[in-house]
């Protein structure tokens, strides 16, 4: 609404708080033992939020069909969205309210996300000597640990009027009113994929193949927004994002003839961290502050990668050979923005009194 219909009177303290402290652990492991050939795989997936595209196979799980198999309705849960336009949202928001406060009032809007992951995949393959085993001996093992966070943390005062006078006042009084709008994201992920392959069979040719892959994708948007009209002493609009990823992948392959081991670690961090007063697509916002006005955006990323492999061969009946490789890739993108803007992208400031200032944004 425009703030004229929804009214909260005589407010001493207004607190709107949301928190997501999800913790998810996924562990997969396998051991395979044979005398001729053994194959194994370990796979773990962790997900918070998910973006769907129109051709995503996952959509089939939410399609309602008629007797002829034609899709008549798609029932997509609120945590899922089509074409990547939005993600799961942790939101603390007040929209379209006039808040008439008492003296020394406090308005606190905060959204906090502390989601954490532990994702581990471990696999082992052993091909043991056996006098009856002839021909070739083969051991193959793969492990993959995959985790993803795709969500938005939002704290917002939208098109509100806050102060100790009526909405008709163009210069709302302060009376030591404090307004804080804070959005905070603190995500941690520990991922590990490890494989061990030993081929020691009794065949004429022996081979060991092992591969470990870790993939982490974090698309976390953290936003603190204020629009409307405010008469305050102090106002703080703050958005802070912290992403901490620890990832390890190791592959070990050993045999007498041919050994191949490899490991890959891929990390992708994206998403914006923003703190704003005013919006380009909203009407003019006004803040009359008799104290301090702060707009702060901070973003921190910490990545720790361990990627290694060991491939060993020797002493076989044929030519011994071994090979391996380790790859670690990090990608960080996104904007960190602290802005004060109006529809024209301008800011105007002036001193009304020696101790007070008014900003139209």
Image: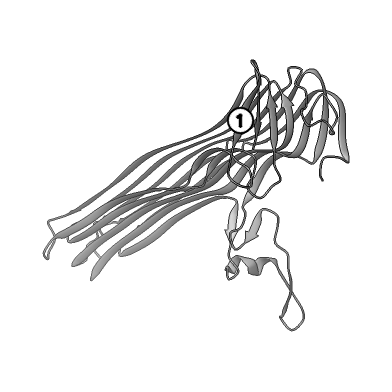
Q: Residue furthest bottom?
A: 68
Which of the two residues, 8 or 21, is positioned nearer the viewer here? 8
Q: Quadrant of residue 316?
A: bottom left
Q: Is residue 96 visible?
A: yes
Q: Is residue 71 left or right of residue 255?
A: right
Image location (x, y in percent) of residue 4: 86, 40
Q: Identify the residue position indicated by label 1 in the image.
A: 349
- Residue ID at (58%, 69%): 57
The correct choice, above or below, for 128 with respect to 18 in the image is below
Image location (x, y in percent) of residue 89: 65, 46
The correct choice, above or below, for 98 with respect to 44 in the image is above
Q: How is the image coloured?
A: one colour
Name the element at disc 1.
strand
Q: Is residue 254 left or right of residue 293?
A: left
Q: Is residue 197 left or right of residue 64?
A: left
- Residue ID at (26%, 65%): 137
Q: Is residue 133 visible?
A: no
- Residue ID at (51%, 50%): 148
Q: Quadrant of the C terminus?
A: top right
Q: Quadrant of residue 135?
A: bottom left
Image location (x, y in percent) of residue 50: 59, 55
Image location (x, y in percent) of residue 296: 55, 31
Dot 1 alpha-carbon crowd within 10 angstroms: few under 14, some 14 to 19, many 20 or more: few
Which of the two residues, 223 or 283, is positioned nearer the viewer here? 283
């Amino acid at each position: 609404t425009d703030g004229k219909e929804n009214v909260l009177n005589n407010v001493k303290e207004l607190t709107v708080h949301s928190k997501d402290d999800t913790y998810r652990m996924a562990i997969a492991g396998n051991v395979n033992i044979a005398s001729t050939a053994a194959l194994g795989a370990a796979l773990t997936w962790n997900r918070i939020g998910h973006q769907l595209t129109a051709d995503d196979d996952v959509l089939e799980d939410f399609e309602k069909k008629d007797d002829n198999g034609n899709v008549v309705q798609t029932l997509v849960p609120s945590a899922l969205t089509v074409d990547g336009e939005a993600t799961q949202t942790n939101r603390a928001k007040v929209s379209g309210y006039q808040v008439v406060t008492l003296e020394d009032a406090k308005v606190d809007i905060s959204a906090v996300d502390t989601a954490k992951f532990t994702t581990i995949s471990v696999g082992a393959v052993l091909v043991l000597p056996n006098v009856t085993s002839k021909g070739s001996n083969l051991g193959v093992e793969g492990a993959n640990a995959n985790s993803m966070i795709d969500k938005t943390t939002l704290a917002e005062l939208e098109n509100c009027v806050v102060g100790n006078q009526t909405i008709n006042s163009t210069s709302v009084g302060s009376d030591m009113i404090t307004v804080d709008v804070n959005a905070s994201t603190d995500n941690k992920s520990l991922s590990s994929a490890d494989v061990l392959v030993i081929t020691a069979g009794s065949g004429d040719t022996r081979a060991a193949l092992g591969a470990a892959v870790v993939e982490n994708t974090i698309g976390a948007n953290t936003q603190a927004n204020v629009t409307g009209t405010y008469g305050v002493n102090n106002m703080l609009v703050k958005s802070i994002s912290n992403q901490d990823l620890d990832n390890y992948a190791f592959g070990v392959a050993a045999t007498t003839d041919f050994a191949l081991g490899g490991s890959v670690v891929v990390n992708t961090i994206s998403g914006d961290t923003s703190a704003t007063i005013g919006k380009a697509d909203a009407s003019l916002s006004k803040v009359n502050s008799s104290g301090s006005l702060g707009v702060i955006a901070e973003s921190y990323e910490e990545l720790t990668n361990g990627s290694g492999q060991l491939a060993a061969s020797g002493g076989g009946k044929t030519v011994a050979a071994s090979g391996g490789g380790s790859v670690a890739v990090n990608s960080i993108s996104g904007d960190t923005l602290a802005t004060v803007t109006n529809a024209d992208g301008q800011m105007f400031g002036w001193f009304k009194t020696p101790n007070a200032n008014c900003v139209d944004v």
